[in-house]
Image (cartoon, grey):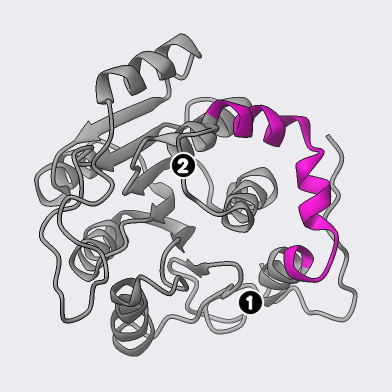
Amino acid sequence: MKNYLPVLDNISHDLRNGRSIYDGYVRGWGIQFGDLREQVRKDPLYKKALALSSGRTVVSEDNRINLFLILRFFLDQAGAGDIIEFGSYRGGNAIFLAHIVAQLYPGTRVYSLDTFAGMPATNSDIDAHQQGDFGEVDLTELRQFADANGLDNLEFVQGLFQDTAPGVLGRTKNIVLAHIDCDIFSSVAYSYEIVKAHMALGGYLVFDDATVSSCLGATEVVESMLIRRDGLNSEQISPQFVFRAGLNHPGPR
Protein backbone atom coordinates (compact mmCIF):
# COMPACT_ATOMS: atom_id res chain seq x y z
CA MET A 1 0.00 0.00 0.00
CA LYS A 2 1.38 3.37 -0.97
CA ASN A 3 2.05 6.25 1.39
CA TYR A 4 -0.56 8.84 0.43
CA LEU A 5 0.14 11.29 3.26
CA PRO A 6 0.49 14.95 2.24
CA VAL A 7 3.96 16.49 2.22
CA LEU A 8 4.20 19.81 4.08
CA ASP A 9 7.55 21.30 3.11
CA ASN A 10 7.09 24.44 5.20
CA ILE A 11 6.65 22.62 8.54
CA SER A 12 9.57 21.52 10.72
CA HIS A 13 9.91 17.87 11.71
CA ASP A 14 11.41 18.79 15.09
CA LEU A 15 9.47 18.13 18.27
CA ARG A 16 7.97 21.19 19.93
CA ASN A 17 6.61 21.19 23.48
CA GLY A 18 6.09 17.43 23.64
CA ARG A 19 4.44 16.93 20.29
CA SER A 20 5.17 16.62 16.59
CA ILE A 21 3.65 19.65 14.92
CA TYR A 22 4.36 18.11 11.52
CA ASP A 23 2.53 14.85 12.29
CA GLY A 24 -0.42 16.71 13.76
CA TYR A 25 -0.77 18.89 10.69
CA VAL A 26 -0.39 15.96 8.29
CA ARG A 27 -3.30 14.09 9.88
CA GLY A 28 -5.52 16.94 11.07
CA TRP A 29 -5.06 19.28 8.11
CA GLY A 30 -5.02 16.35 5.71
CA ILE A 31 -8.45 15.19 6.89
CA GLN A 32 -10.06 18.61 7.31
CA PHE A 33 -8.69 20.44 4.28
CA GLY A 34 -6.83 17.89 2.14
CA ASP A 35 -7.87 14.67 0.46
CA LEU A 36 -6.90 12.20 3.19
CA ARG A 37 -10.50 11.26 3.87
CA GLU A 38 -10.94 10.15 0.27
CA GLN A 39 -7.56 8.39 0.19
CA VAL A 40 -8.31 6.40 3.35
CA ARG A 41 -11.74 5.39 2.10
CA LYS A 42 -10.00 3.66 -0.85
CA ASP A 43 -7.41 1.87 1.28
CA PRO A 44 -8.09 -1.91 1.20
CA LEU A 45 -7.01 -2.36 4.83
CA TYR A 46 -9.35 0.41 5.99
CA LYS A 47 -12.24 -0.97 3.93
CA LYS A 48 -11.88 -4.46 5.40
CA ALA A 49 -11.62 -3.17 8.97
CA LEU A 50 -14.61 -0.89 8.43
CA ALA A 51 -16.70 -3.76 7.07
CA LEU A 52 -15.91 -5.86 10.15
CA SER A 53 -16.97 -3.04 12.49
CA SER A 54 -20.13 -2.10 10.60
CA GLY A 55 -23.16 -1.58 12.84
CA ARG A 56 -21.11 -1.98 16.03
CA THR A 57 -19.63 1.49 16.62
CA VAL A 58 -20.71 5.10 17.01
CA VAL A 59 -17.20 6.50 16.51
CA SER A 60 -17.43 9.25 13.89
CA GLU A 61 -15.91 8.69 10.47
CA ASP A 62 -13.23 11.37 10.84
CA ASN A 63 -12.19 10.07 14.26
CA ARG A 64 -12.01 6.54 12.87
CA ILE A 65 -9.95 7.75 9.90
CA ASN A 66 -7.58 9.56 12.26
CA LEU A 67 -7.09 6.39 14.32
CA PHE A 68 -6.43 4.48 11.11
CA LEU A 69 -3.79 7.01 10.04
CA ILE A 70 -2.06 6.79 13.43
CA LEU A 71 -1.92 3.00 13.16
CA ARG A 72 -1.03 2.87 9.49
CA PHE A 73 1.72 5.49 9.35
CA PHE A 74 2.76 6.68 12.82
CA LEU A 75 2.40 4.02 15.53
CA ASP A 76 5.84 2.52 14.94
CA GLN A 77 7.36 5.74 16.33
CA ALA A 78 6.35 4.46 19.78
CA GLY A 79 8.00 1.06 19.33
CA ALA A 80 6.47 -2.27 20.29
CA GLY A 81 3.52 -2.44 22.64
CA ASP A 82 -0.18 -3.01 23.07
CA ILE A 83 -3.38 -1.02 22.61
CA ILE A 84 -6.06 -0.37 25.20
CA GLU A 85 -9.52 1.06 24.68
CA PHE A 86 -11.53 2.45 27.57
CA GLY A 87 -15.18 2.37 26.53
CA SER A 88 -16.10 0.04 23.67
CA TYR A 89 -19.92 -0.14 23.57
CA ARG A 90 -20.68 -2.88 21.00
CA GLY A 91 -17.00 -3.46 20.29
CA GLY A 92 -16.90 -2.18 16.72
CA ASN A 93 -13.96 0.16 17.11
CA ALA A 94 -11.97 -2.44 19.03
CA ILE A 95 -12.61 -4.88 16.17
CA PHE A 96 -11.52 -2.18 13.71
CA LEU A 97 -8.27 -1.59 15.62
CA ALA A 98 -7.57 -5.29 16.12
CA HIS A 99 -7.91 -6.16 12.44
CA ILE A 100 -5.53 -3.37 11.42
CA VAL A 101 -2.80 -4.17 13.94
CA ALA A 102 -3.05 -7.87 13.17
CA GLN A 103 -1.96 -7.00 9.63
CA LEU A 104 0.61 -4.32 10.48
CA TYR A 105 2.02 -5.27 13.91
CA PRO A 106 1.81 -9.02 14.58
CA GLY A 107 2.01 -9.69 18.31
CA THR A 108 0.27 -6.45 19.31
CA ARG A 109 -2.82 -7.05 21.44
CA VAL A 110 -5.92 -4.91 21.79
CA TYR A 111 -7.67 -4.78 25.16
CA SER A 112 -11.27 -3.58 25.03
CA LEU A 113 -12.57 -2.47 28.46
CA ASP A 114 -16.22 -1.79 29.17
CA THR A 115 -19.01 -2.83 31.49
CA PHE A 116 -20.81 -4.02 28.33
CA ALA A 117 -23.93 -3.31 30.37
CA GLY A 118 -24.20 0.47 30.17
CA MET A 119 -22.60 3.44 31.84
CA PRO A 120 -21.93 3.54 35.58
CA ALA A 121 -23.28 6.37 37.75
CA THR A 122 -22.76 9.79 36.17
CA ASN A 123 -22.48 13.32 37.59
CA SER A 124 -25.31 15.61 36.52
CA ASP A 125 -23.14 18.63 37.37
CA ILE A 126 -21.02 17.96 34.27
CA ASP A 127 -22.21 14.85 32.38
CA ALA A 128 -25.06 14.84 29.86
CA HIS A 129 -25.16 11.04 29.75
CA GLN A 130 -27.00 8.99 32.37
CA GLN A 131 -26.38 5.69 34.12
CA GLY A 132 -27.25 2.77 31.85
CA ASP A 133 -26.67 4.57 28.54
CA PHE A 134 -25.10 2.36 25.84
CA GLY A 135 -26.21 -0.80 27.59
CA GLU A 136 -27.65 -2.80 24.69
CA VAL A 137 -24.72 -5.17 24.16
CA ASP A 138 -24.63 -8.95 23.68
CA LEU A 139 -21.09 -9.71 24.86
CA THR A 140 -21.34 -13.42 24.09
CA GLU A 141 -22.26 -12.68 20.46
CA LEU A 142 -19.51 -10.05 20.28
CA ARG A 143 -16.86 -12.49 21.42
CA GLN A 144 -18.14 -15.14 19.02
CA PHE A 145 -17.97 -12.65 16.15
CA ALA A 146 -14.37 -11.72 16.97
CA ASP A 147 -13.38 -15.40 17.21
CA ALA A 148 -15.12 -16.22 13.91
CA ASN A 149 -13.12 -13.51 12.19
CA GLY A 150 -9.77 -14.66 13.53
CA LEU A 151 -9.19 -11.75 15.90
CA ASP A 152 -7.20 -13.70 18.46
CA ASN A 153 -5.29 -10.50 19.32
CA LEU A 154 -8.45 -8.92 20.79
CA GLU A 155 -9.62 -9.35 24.37
CA PHE A 156 -12.93 -7.99 25.68
CA VAL A 157 -12.64 -7.25 29.40
CA GLN A 158 -15.94 -6.79 31.22
CA GLY A 159 -16.37 -4.70 34.36
CA LEU A 160 -15.79 -1.29 35.85
CA PHE A 161 -12.43 0.15 34.85
CA GLN A 162 -11.41 0.36 38.51
CA ASP A 163 -11.85 -3.40 38.79
CA THR A 164 -10.30 -4.47 35.48
CA ALA A 165 -7.71 -1.94 34.28
CA PRO A 166 -5.06 -2.57 36.96
CA GLY A 167 -4.92 -6.27 36.12
CA VAL A 168 -4.85 -5.69 32.37
CA LEU A 169 -2.12 -3.07 32.60
CA GLY A 170 -0.14 -5.28 34.93
CA ARG A 171 0.27 -7.94 32.24
CA THR A 172 0.65 -5.86 29.08
CA LYS A 173 3.68 -4.60 27.28
CA ASN A 174 4.05 -0.84 26.92
CA ILE A 175 0.87 0.84 25.77
CA VAL A 176 1.47 2.47 22.39
CA LEU A 177 -2.12 3.68 21.93
CA ALA A 178 -4.74 4.43 24.57
CA HIS A 179 -8.12 5.18 23.04
CA ILE A 180 -10.21 6.83 25.76
CA ASP A 181 -13.85 6.79 24.65
CA CYS A 182 -15.96 6.71 27.80
CA ASP A 183 -17.83 10.05 27.66
CA ILE A 184 -18.16 10.98 31.34
CA PHE A 185 -15.81 12.84 33.68
CA SER A 186 -15.14 10.10 36.22
CA SER A 187 -14.42 7.38 33.66
CA VAL A 188 -12.24 9.54 31.44
CA ALA A 189 -10.30 10.86 34.45
CA TYR A 190 -9.71 7.36 35.83
CA SER A 191 -8.68 6.00 32.42
CA TYR A 192 -6.06 8.69 31.93
CA GLU A 193 -4.71 8.41 35.47
CA ILE A 194 -4.33 4.63 35.37
CA VAL A 195 -2.83 4.37 31.88
CA LYS A 196 -0.36 7.25 31.83
CA ALA A 197 2.35 5.41 33.78
CA HIS A 198 2.14 2.52 31.31
CA MET A 199 2.49 4.56 28.12
CA ALA A 200 5.42 3.93 25.80
CA LEU A 201 7.65 6.87 25.02
CA GLY A 202 5.86 8.69 22.22
CA GLY A 203 2.70 6.61 22.70
CA TYR A 204 -0.62 8.08 21.63
CA LEU A 205 -3.32 9.22 24.05
CA VAL A 206 -6.47 9.71 21.97
CA PHE A 207 -9.66 11.18 23.45
CA ASP A 208 -12.66 10.39 21.30
CA ASP A 209 -15.21 12.45 23.21
CA ALA A 210 -13.48 15.61 24.41
CA THR A 211 -14.61 17.67 21.41
CA VAL A 212 -18.17 16.29 21.42
CA SER A 213 -20.97 18.63 22.51
CA SER A 214 -22.54 16.08 24.89
CA CYS A 215 -19.28 15.20 26.66
CA LEU A 216 -18.04 18.28 28.50
CA GLY A 217 -16.93 15.98 31.31
CA ALA A 218 -14.35 14.50 28.92
CA THR A 219 -13.40 18.01 27.82
CA GLU A 220 -12.85 19.07 31.42
CA VAL A 221 -10.50 16.14 32.05
CA VAL A 222 -8.36 17.18 29.09
CA GLU A 223 -8.37 20.82 30.19
CA SER A 224 -7.80 20.35 33.91
CA MET A 225 -5.63 17.23 34.08
CA LEU A 226 -3.63 16.95 30.87
CA ILE A 227 -3.18 20.60 29.92
CA ARG A 228 -3.23 22.60 33.17
CA ARG A 229 -1.97 20.03 35.69
CA ASP A 230 0.38 17.86 33.62
CA GLY A 231 1.46 20.53 31.15
CA LEU A 232 0.81 18.47 28.02
CA ASN A 233 0.22 20.05 24.63
CA SER A 234 -2.04 18.39 22.09
CA GLU A 235 -0.65 17.11 18.81
CA GLN A 236 -4.15 17.38 17.34
CA ILE A 237 -7.42 19.03 18.24
CA SER A 238 -9.13 18.01 15.01
CA PRO A 239 -10.88 15.71 14.54
CA GLN A 240 -10.11 14.67 18.15
CA PHE A 241 -7.64 15.44 20.92
CA VAL A 242 -4.37 13.54 20.50
CA PHE A 243 -1.48 13.80 22.97
CA ARG A 244 1.93 12.09 22.99
CA ALA A 245 3.42 10.50 26.10
CA GLY A 246 6.83 11.48 27.41
CA LEU A 247 7.99 13.78 24.57
CA ASN A 248 8.74 16.68 26.88
CA HIS A 249 12.06 17.87 25.43
CA PRO A 250 12.19 19.67 22.08
CA GLY A 251 14.60 18.52 19.43
CA PRO A 252 14.84 16.37 16.29
CA ARG A 253 13.36 12.87 16.21
Query: Which residue was labeled with disc 1?
Result: 15
Whether residue 105 is visible, yes or no, is no
Say which residue appears at 47% left-offset and 31% top-offset. Answer: 95
Q: Is residue 124 above or below residue 129?
A: below
Which mark is nearer the camera, 1 or 2? Answer: 2
Tag 2: residue type?
Thr
Quadrant into which the C terminus falls: bottom right
Which secondary structure is most common in the magenta stretch?
A: helix
Label 2 residue SS = loop
Whether residue 82 is visible, yes or no, is yes
Q: Give the extent of the magenta segment.
A: 30-52
Q: Nearer the viewer, residue 179 or 119?
A: 119
Tell me which numbered mark, 1 or 2, is placed earlier along the sequence: 1
Residue 40 horizontal side relative to residue 69, left or right: right
Where residue 245 sits, quadrant-wise, is: bottom left
Q: Residue 246 location, x and y as percent?
A: 43, 69
Is 195 inside the magenta-drawn segment?
A: no
Quadrant into which the N terminus falls: top right
Q: Is residue 191 above or below residue 236?
A: above
Q: Residue 4 location, x and y as percent?
A: 86, 50
Say which residue appears at 23% left-offset and 65% top-offset. Answer: 193
**Disc 1/disc 2 C-alpha distance (Å):** 34 Å
Q: Residue 154 location, x and y as percent?
A: 39, 27
Query: Which residue was labeled with disc 2?
Result: 57
Q: Nearer the viewer, residue 47 or 54?
A: 54
Say which residue appears at 26% left-offset and 25% top-offset. Answer: 139
Q: Is residue 105 above or below residue 135?
A: above
Residue 179 horizontal side relative to residue 220, left or right: right
